[in-house]
Image (spheres, rainbow, N blue to C red):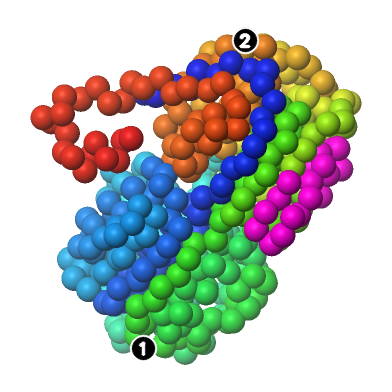
Amino acid sequence: MDKFRITGGRSLKGSVSISGAKNSALPCMAAALLTPETVTLHNIPYVRDIITQRRLLEDLGATVLTPELRTHKINARNIELFEAPYELVKTMRASVLALGPLLARFGKAKVSLPGGCAIGTRPIDLHLAAFEKLGAEVRLEAGNVVARSPASGRLVGAEIHFDKVTVTGTENLMMAAALARGRTILHGAACEPEITDLAELLNKMGARISGAGTATIEIEGVEALGGGEHTIIPDRIETGTFMAAAAITRGELEIMDCQPKHLTCVIEQLSDVGVEIDEINSSKLHVRATKSLTAKDVTTEPYPRFPTDMQAQYMALMTQARGRSIIVETIFENRFMHGSELQRMGARIQIDGHKAILEGPTPLTGAPLLASDLRASASLVLAGLVAEGETVVDRVYHIDRGYEKIEAKLRAVGADIERIRESVTAPLSRTSVKDVAEVV
Ligand code: EPU
């Protein structure tokens, strides 16, 4: 397993370019299952979860061509399998995004039920109840969700009320309802920019979706969808992570190819803490931290409020801010694993259920650390950048799932970080050329 070795203490300076949003690319790739025509997606990030999603599509029978590294041309004319096996779902929960499109287009789908993961139990009961509202028959069989469309054939539009905001649930339902007979209204829908991005792609494919980006989405089902071409939005969480990197190292970064309008709450929060942030234009931010930082409380909430996917990085930052801060996590029940690793570096953090109470600033010292999930890993890397001495972050496969070459991007702006490779140990004769291309 690869590790990062980081020697802290350097201020970051320079410019960094943001990749496409993983959490938008994943549903957009799944949407290609809705049509026999080709869907072309640009600005796909080169991260592990995308490789997993591509494998899933190919296993189902789709062809995926990559004429350029970040462009995928997906054709799902000849789908032969209608199931996402446990082997894939256990490595990536977003595989459940295959359910909606397979069910809507082929009337059947079988997806292994994802278990809990490092950040919480994460059930998909809301997806399943909503599919039933569209007339699907949903059963649990030997750890799999087996869904079938009604005997009459197509799914049927319905009014759906989500009791809780669910991002992939909203996406799954938007995709399923796009091919249902009649109108579907999603109440309590997620408003994340990734939802709007998916709706935009689906509309380009011929869907009739309005209201995406608000809590009420209306979908007028159509009989068939065609191909489409779409550019994935920039990754707002990668953007926020680099903002935090500039702030924690008292550095100065120009963040290019981002969309500041998707980060209003993060920008406000970091500005309150004392980070100087200028929106240079609609795709560029200038972030500088010269003053000392002041601790501020934060609560994670669905978009447009402060994202849970930035909570761990914000916690690392608060270890360097003056005063007490309380971080409340309301989305996932177990998303403070990074807290105990930060404590091992010297941070003063008390975890009390959904609440973390920090006292800062505390000098951090380098230590061997264990990454527990994607955003936790990012938080540990940030802490390593400011810690005295050497930090080794183990299990960086978590970070590779969602950050494109984070160590290269950080090194280019002055960080002392290197990857200790332990994964490319298989003899070449047993590794296909494709696999080698994927692990680099
Ligand atoms: N929930 C249910 N039942 C459901 C669905 C969700 O109880 O049927 C609960 C979850 O357990 C959680 C809350 O509702 O407590 C929100 O979950 P949601 O469904 O919104 O999360 P998700 O769709 O599984 C996506 C992102 C996550 C991000 C969350 C919240 C993707 C592929 N994943 O997950 O991203 O944290 O929304 O914004 O879009 C990450 O990128 O690191 C990541 C974890």
Give the amino acid at mark 1. Answer: Glu
Q: Is residue 281 magenta?
A: yes
- For the question of whether residue 187 can be seen, the reply is no
Horizontal side of residue 139 vs 343, given as left or right = left
Residue 389's label in the rendered image is: 2
Query: Image quarter for residue 128?
Result: bottom left
Query: Image quarter for residue 414?
Result: top right
Give the amino acid at mark 2. Answer: Gly
In the image, what residue occupies the spot 30% across and 40% down? 438
Residue 84 pos. (x, y %) = 29, 55
Secondary element at tag 2: loop
Q: Is residue 363 magenta?
A: no
Residue at mark 1:
223
Relative to 310, residue 264 above or below: below
Relative to 146, residue 338 above or below: above
Disc 2 from disc 1: Cα separation: 61 Å
> What span is in magenta?
268-286
Relative to 124, residue 290 above or below: above
- Image quadrant containing the N terminus: top left
Please name whichever residue, 316 or 17, is drawn nearer the observer in this view of the structure.
Answer: 17
Relative to 211, residue 330 above or below: above
Secondary element at tag 1: loop
Horizontal side of residue 372 vs 29, given as left or right = right
Q: Residues within 10 Å of mark 2 (few under 14, many from 20)?
A: some
In the image, what residue occupies the spot 50% across and 31% down? 407
Residue 439's label in the rendered image is: none
Residue 416 pos. (x, y %) = 56, 21
